[in-house]
Image (spheres, rainbow, N blue to C red):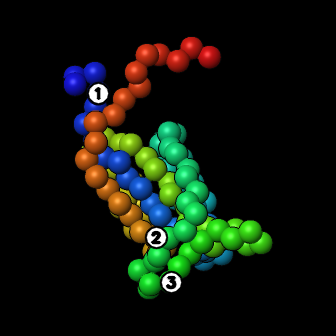
Amino acid sequence: MQRLKSGYEVTFIVPESRRHEGKRIVDLVTDTAEAHGITRMTWRRDVEGVGEDGRMHAAHFFELADQPVELIYALGEEAAERFIDAIEATGAPVFCLCRPVHFGQLNEHNG
């Protein structure tokens, strides 16, 4: 697996509408990533989830604001550590999952 890098999948999970100091946390995370030169990520909207407080967060027909969102990044060890530290320094309440992975671009994309 030498063609792939070793690192971490860093996933932040938060209800889409949750705010910290007036800013949506999903925007805070993506802005922090950009500030650290992290350009590749996946944004996944989930149907429902249960938070640490035991409260259900879900997307409903009339109200999508409480929909859980996953922001997923594949990073080298040092970049993952710096990114998690930067998010933690904001004081924003966000769940973080970090697991070891092998990752990399296979077959160059030309266009």
Of residue 88 and residue 98, the one placed in the foreground of this image is 98
Residue 69 horizontal side relative to residue 12, left or right: right
Farthest left residue in view:
2
Residue sitting at x 58%, y 63%: 47
**N-term-proximal mark, 3 vs 2:** 3
- Circle nearer the viewer, 3 or 1: 3
Q: Quadrant of residue 104?
A: top left
As rendered, which of 111 and 64 lies closer to the eye? Answer: 64
Q: What type is the residue that disc 3 sits on?
A: Arg
Residue bearing the label numbered 1: 4
Q: Compute the Cα span from label 1 to label 2.
A: 29 Å
Task: Give the residue number, with chain letter if any, for mark 3.
Answer: 55
Q: Are marks 3 and 1 in contact (CB under 8 Å)?
A: no
Local secondary structure at mark 3: loop
Q: Are marks 3 and 2 in contact (CB under 8 Å)?
A: no
The three-letter amino acid code for the residue at tag 1 is Leu
For label 3, the crowd category at 10 Å Cα-Cα, with few meaning under 14, some 14 to 19 and many 20 or more, is few
Q: How far, Cα to Cα, is label 3 from label 1?
A: 39 Å
Earlier sequence position, callout 1 versus callout 2: 1
Quadrant in the rendering for residue 65: bottom right
Task: Judge the density around disc 2: few (<14), some (14-19), many (≥20) Cα neighbours within 10 Å.
Answer: some
Q: Position of residue 111 (x, y in %)?
A: 62, 16
- The disc labelled 2 sits on which kind of residue? Val
Among numbered discs 3 and 1, the one appearing first in the sequence: 1
Note whether residue 23 is visible.
Answer: no
